Image: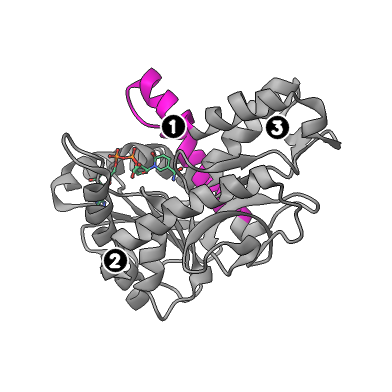
Amino acid sequence: MKTPIHIAVTGAAGQISYSLLFRLSAGLLLGPDQPIVLHLLEITPAMGVLEGVVMELNDCASPLLQRVIMTDDPRIAFKNVDYAFLIGARPRGPGMERKDLLQVNAEIFAVQGRALNEVASRSVKVLVTGNPANTNTLIAIKNAPDLKPENFSSMSRLDHNRALSYLAEKCGVHTPDIINMSIWGNHSATQYPDLNHAKVKGQSALSLLDADWVIDDFIPKIQQRGAEVINARGQSSAASAANAAIDQMKSWTLGTEAGDWVSMGILSAGDYGIDTDLVYSFPVSVTTDRVDVVQGLAISEFSLERMRLTEQELKEERDAVRHLL
Ligand code: NAX
């Protein structure tokens, strides 16, 4: 029997976690022969709901789930964990401005960054999903000086998967027929889904598409997809977000396919002229435990303008939370 791997999930009683936890206990992240221990973090008022979720987890009788730890203390939740899914965040309430949301959530990620710094495994992979995900990741990094920035990433994979799926539908192919999709920047409506390097069955995607469709349909569709789901479902994306969180952690752990890449929010080292000290989504290739920004991509004037616009939004978010960095 393999030694169990410890996985923390925050916001464990929320709707994304309600999809994620059952996938984790079914072995979808680490495979069907890897036992796991789940460390579930919630705020005190949500502990009752969390107990119900854990009853259901237990009722799955998963052969992989060895133990579940429920807590409202980040230091217990992150103790010796190998993976941490930071999903829990405050949703925007009535009358709450974006900047208010930024503040309350920023504080959560400062506390959690410090706790990870103190007690997590030194090789922990921390994936931030809770919004504003990129800036929350930056705050966690800055509050965890004994971990490396490489221990952290923010989730771009849902945007990446949305872009793959929408392009596949347009071209009448399946998603594995597409490679080299890129999402640049913030996980927000300013993100830049970029088809310039994408290939469909080996052919340049742009050679198959009308330029107007790319600009007037594809780009706004991916940027607004979260809002479209909320309008239709009355709630934000949950199962697709859980699926994307597992996809991103898997790519991070197992690496990307030769010739392909994925999109991940990582601390910028200045690639493509993006300000350092921002967590920005880049196209990245991953080999065992090494995440590298894809180098040498030709960037058009149009792309550069879009990449700068989303960078600007991230700078403004960073300015609003300076006191926590
Ligand atoms: P829910 O409101 O259903 O669940 C959030 C949970 O977090 C709640 O149970 C709450 O009690 C808990 N929580 C709040 N503060 C906490 C803290 N300090 N410690 C631990 N738990 C805490 O939201 P859900 O739909 O699950 O979404 C969670 C986050 O993901 C939101 O911020 C949402 O905006 C964000 N999303 C990010 C996406 C991405 O691609 N990066 C896409 C999906 C999603 O919109």
Image quadrant assignment for residue 166: top right
Residue 114 on the magenta segment: no
Q: Which of the two residues, 178 or 23, is positioned nearer the viewer here?
A: 178
Q: Give the range drawn in magenta.
A: 224-251
Return the residue at label 1.
Answer: 226
Return the residue at label 3.
Answer: 175
Q: How far is the residue under mark 3 from the one under mark 2? A: 37 Å
The N terminus: image quadrant: bottom right
Report the amino acid beneath label 1.
Gly
Foreground: disc 1 or disc 3: 1
Residue 145 screen position, x and y as percent: 40, 79
Report the amino acid beneath label 3.
Thr
**Residue found at x 57% / y 42%:** 192
Q: How far is the residue under mark 1 from the one under mark 3? A: 20 Å
Ligand 1 neighbours mark 1 (CB distance < 8 Å) = yes
Query: In this picture, is 123 found above or below 197?
Result: below
Q: Is residue 160 visible?
A: yes
Judging from the image, what secondary structure is the residue with disc 1 in?
helix
